[in-house]
Amino acid sequence: MEGERSEYPKKQFYSISEVAEIVGTNESTLRFWEREFKEIKPRRASRGIRLYSNADLQIVKLIYHLVKEKGLTLDGAKKRLKENSAKENSIMEVMNRLKEVRAELLAIRNYIDFLETEERERALQKETKKTVSEPQQTYVEVSEEEMLAEESVVDIAFEEEEPKTTTPLSLF
């Protein structure tokens, strides 16, 4: 159910505030439904405190389902309860189970998305480390004229370094 809390403690009796929290409605609505639906019969403890049994809780859940989720009027919900409350109860249980399965599947999908995001981040970090650790080689385009100019400079340098011949000096 939409407002129903999925996990609640299993007890023999529940207070009206606990039932209101479990079902997802307020206490005044429960008191009103108690007057309208004869099927809800909570025990009264000392000082008039209502104690709902598990059977009462199931009936309140069914009424909530019929009125709030299916959109029936109170008279329509009363008729459904009189005609076939077992069928309505089983339909409600199936719907609740389907909602639980859907919630589990969504949780799994969210977990898979989380893992995929983490994997992408790790791959990105590896790429970043790889590019930082490997120095990148850069190439500069050199025109033919520049290459010829460099060659002539090299040739001139070699020509200057040729050994010079010396003539011996004579004293006479």
Image: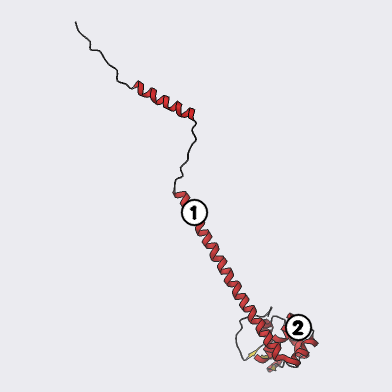
State the SS at label 1.
helix
Question: Quarter of the image containing the C terminus?
Answer: top left
Of all residues shown, which one is farthest toward the front?
Answer: 144
Q: Quadrant of residue 11?
A: bottom right
Residue 160, percent across and down? 35, 21
Q: Quadrant of residue 61?
A: bottom right
User: From mark 2 to mark 1, how far is it between C-alphas?
Assistant: 58 Å
Q: Quadrant of residue 69?
A: bottom right
Q: Nearer the viewer, residue 67 or 20?
A: 67
Above or below, 12 against 21 in this view is below
Query: From the viewer's perspective, is 23 left or right of 171?
Result: right
> Type of residue at label 2?
Val
Above or below, 41 against 125 in this view is below
Query: From the viewer's perspective, is 57 left or right of 32?
Result: left
Residue 109, percent across and down? 58, 70
Q: Nearer the viewer, residue 31 or 88?
A: 88
* Mark 2 touches mark 1? (CB < 8 Å): no
> Type of residue at label 1?
Glu
Q: Which residue is rendered at x = 48% and y = 55% of the image?
A: 126
